[in-house]
Amino acid sequence: MRNFELIVIGGGSAGLAAAIEARKQGIKDILVLEKESELGGILNQCIHNGFGLHSLKKEYSGPAYAQVYIDEFNQFKIPAYLNTTVIELSSDRQVTFMSPEWGVETIQAKAIILAMGCRERTRGAVSIPGNRCTGVWTAGTAQKYLNIEGYLVGKRIFILGSGDIGLIMARRLTLAGAEVVGVAELMPYSNGLTRNLVQCLYDYDIPLYLSTTITAIHGKERVERITLTQVDEARQPIPSTSREIEVDTVLLSIGLIPENTLSTQAGIELDQRTKGAVVDQHYATQNEGYFACGNVLHVHDLVDYVSQEGQSAGRSAAEYIKNGKGEGRNLSTQAGENVSYVVPQKLILSETPELIQIKFRVRSVMKEAEVILRDQQGILQKIAKSHLAPAEMEMMYLSPKLLQQAQGSIIVEVREKHE
Amino acid sequence: MSEKEIICIVCPKGCHIQVTVDTAGITCKNYGCPRGKEYAIQEATMPKRMLTGTVKINNAIHPRLPVMSDQPVAKEKLREMMDELDKITVEAPITVNQLIIRNILDSGVNIVASRTMEVYHD
Amino acid sequence: MKDILIIGAGIVGSSIAYACSKKNLDVVLLEKNIEAMDEVSSANSGIVHAGYDPEEGTLKAKLNLRGSRLYPNLCRELKVGYLNCGAFIVATSDEEAEILETLRLKAVQRDIPYEVLTKEEALQQEPNLTDQVISVLSFPSTAVVTPWEVGHAMIETAILNQVEFITDSEVLEVLKIEGGFRIITATNRLEAKMIINASGLCGDKVARLNRVDYPKVLSYRRGEYDVFDRSFQGFIDHVIYPVPTALGKGVLALVTVEGNIMIGPNSEVIDTPYDTQTTAEGLASVSQRINKTMKNLPVGAIIRQFAGVRPVPITKDFIIEEDTPDWINVIGIESPGLASAPAIAEMVMNDFIQPKFQANERVDYNYRSAPIKIMESDPKTRAALIKENPKYGKMVCLCEQVSEQEIVDCIHRPDGARSVKGVKKRVRPGSGRCQGGFCEPEIVKILARELKIDLSEVVYDTINSTMLKRKG
């Protein structure tokens, strides 16, 4: 069996950044396994701009941002197997892959970085009743058809979900000649960036229906109409508000799910809140030699932070390969009131004081709020925040002093100040 | 005289800025910072957007090459420019930032390749 | 003039065509849609019932029992999946336990193997049964198959043995001519000595094309289902039934050959036969009623809903009759139609076809070769396959682990896939947790390439279900 120091599963933004950093840290023996016929992952179909504002200090389109990393990756001559799918992953880091070029092979790694990204939530997962005619797609699939292949999915389109993917596609489809009849959002506020609301909906007079959902899709051989219904505070449909709209296409932008089927197979402990692995601040999972980063760990909004996370995971994996697992005092984090999740879930405090970055999301839009960090003894820190939203991942640093003081579990909660 | 409400996109605060344009000049109300004010004035008087789209490409890994304008273009010209993109076909290989359309619709803006696409055969 | 023309390539028509292919008969099988097995046969529970349930003296009783015994060999011959999972009928009250006893007696009478299980025994075998279980009647001979896999395999084998298969051919007119019939479709005139009407949902409508005063004998019922992700395979091992009532078999928990668990169906009378929509009320009814027999259902793992429609005969039994000389109706085939199909074909052959034709056995019969499933091959075979044909090594559907070449293969076999759904039915891409989110564009591209059409001409299932429009 062939041995590698590091195998990276996924050659998208997380995997590329991780592999590059591991190489920079001196790891020679790296292999990236990528299922598509090229590197870059989902960025290849995200032809719009807005990428790299934070990390590269310039605005890139998705493919251009990917190209920066692909060029660096190629300069380092890091091997990548394309068209290659991992079909089995073991708890002791044996990777079985299948590839037209390489056949089927099982290889052994000292360390593995999971960077498989995520998939889209489907109609079936949320059970939208009606006919199962063609004309219903997730927004990402429609994006692939248009930006990669050059085909429009329909002429009169309705979008469910006002997250960024739905908004971006509203604009893209309009500019490509389709009519986007409207966007419905289950929540009473949009999940997307204000920039996208302005440049994707308001710019094109596309109506946004808040507290609204699609309760049925009808059509014989193709979608012909949808039933749009308002929802109450408990997000339950109010039947008397139902009305029908004639469209030929429905796009769903209703959430992303980290793609952890292989991780589960390898016995990697997952966090039910993030649907990604439980990791420490080194992005090491609870399974020896496995690391995770990017959308497979938790769904990100900005690729800049995916690259950063990939870089951290690459550095940590390199450190692990060179010097093994670090020791230290164990702490954990916990999502408290108004917080839906915290990453990393575990902290290992070594002798050397370090700043640890945590990432979390709030459950609802909050203004004039306080982030409260506490343990069972009491409050450790309070930080004022004027604006927080579920669609914007928060990041903050825990100081060495706070970490030294903390016992057991650090609970992250958010309260609006007037409470 | 025209009055517009501009939602600022410079930072997550999203201030709703009132921009009034009349013979005396331009005034802004309700902005949270100077960057926001600058954005609102631009948006109210001559809104611009980056153009991103695709063009047909032969002999590459995909049938479409993603392209981007090298600077923002007038917002009202966007659709016309998108139609221009549909008129051309390029040949692989293309390098990222390679010029695809010079001075599109006489705007002074160039359209460049968003990525590299080598020659590719299945 | 052909000997036999079969109208409808659902499980019944395909079974009859298959039976005919074993004899020296000149047969044509007509299918209205562009793909066979696309209506009743595409959306049902997939159960080969053991045969205890139908009323004594009915065709259903006779043919279900016979069919259930023919299936294992049939699936071996066709090289398709057959899962002998067994069935549990779950009693949760003393009244229900009494009804179980009446079923047990029927099983004794029909020589169907059974076992009575105590609560402890039942929960030991199926820990996810409701805690309200009092006793279970177990039927080890119940099995499940993938109906369209069986149907397509029968059609393919029939084609390999001289049966002509024509799709996209709705029968528009029937004329009596010397020696037989002339069947008119939009693009064909076909003549045959005998017509077998196995046209499913439009059974009585097609019968009326032959005899203008044929009565309306069919009404329609719809059943809705939830499908769970394959990762929950093993949640149950048997098909789990509640105790049957006058309304029917009830909401079941099902296993499938591929490993997906399903729950359903409810049963709702509908007005028009093609109303296969799922409804909020129907799905809610399924979710609620399944709790009678099950606990711990992983509802977060539901990946899909679907609804199937079946024709309900007014006689409450299969209608298998020679309505006018040499016009055979085989209609009103509702449950246990799938289980009975091979026996229905046998009956049609013995009672109608052979008396007229007395055909000999076909010599040098050609059985089909099993489709290659790359993930089920042993490592050595897999390596050799990929070396010879690298497309076997390119995974297109990650959720179900289907390679590019398997998709290409299923398009080019006899009775090959002509649509995205046709590919999905034959080799599974799009059936998994991402529901085609990643792989559908690749399926569309492969269909376009292999059928030599543009992507905008690729259809999802029916002839007008095009999906894409070329941009610019």
Image (cartoon, grey):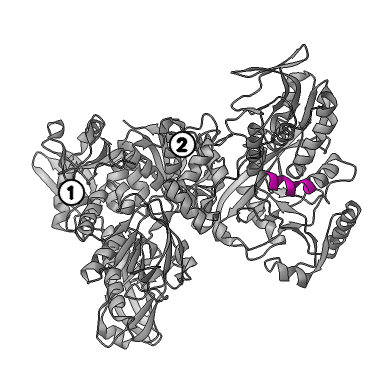
Residue at image point 39% right, 75% down: A345
* Image x and y of residue B81, in percent: 21, 33
- Looking at the rendered image, the disc whose residue lies closer to the viewer, 2 or 1, is 2
- Find the distance from the CA under tag 2 to the CA under tag 1: 50 Å
Q: Which residues are magenta?
A: C68-77
Q: Nearer the viewer, residue C249 or A2?
A: A2
* Image x and y of residue C95, in percent: 85, 61
Q: Are marks 2 and 1 in contact (CB under 8 Å)?
A: no
Q: Which element type, helix, strand or loop, lies under badge 1?
A: helix
Which amino acid is tagged 1?
A: Ala
Relative horizontal placement of residue C63, taking residue C200 as reference (left or right): right
Q: Quadrant of residue C167?
A: top right
Q: Nearer the viewer, residue C431 or C317?
A: C431
Q: Which residue is mark 1?
A: B40
Q: Quadrant of the N terminus of chain C?
A: top right
Q: Nearer the viewer, residue A60 or C143?
A: C143
Q: Which element type, helix, strand or loop, lies under badge 2?
A: helix
Residue A373 is one of the magenta-drawn residues: no
Residue at image point 28% right, 76% down: A319
Characterize the magenta stretch by its predominant secondary structure: helix
Q: Which residue is mark 2?
A: C447
Relative horizontal placement of residue B58, taking residue A185 as reference (left or right): left
* Image x and y of residue C241, in percent: 74, 56
Which amino acid is tagged 2?
A: Leu
Image vertical order of residue A350 relative to residue B64, above or below: below
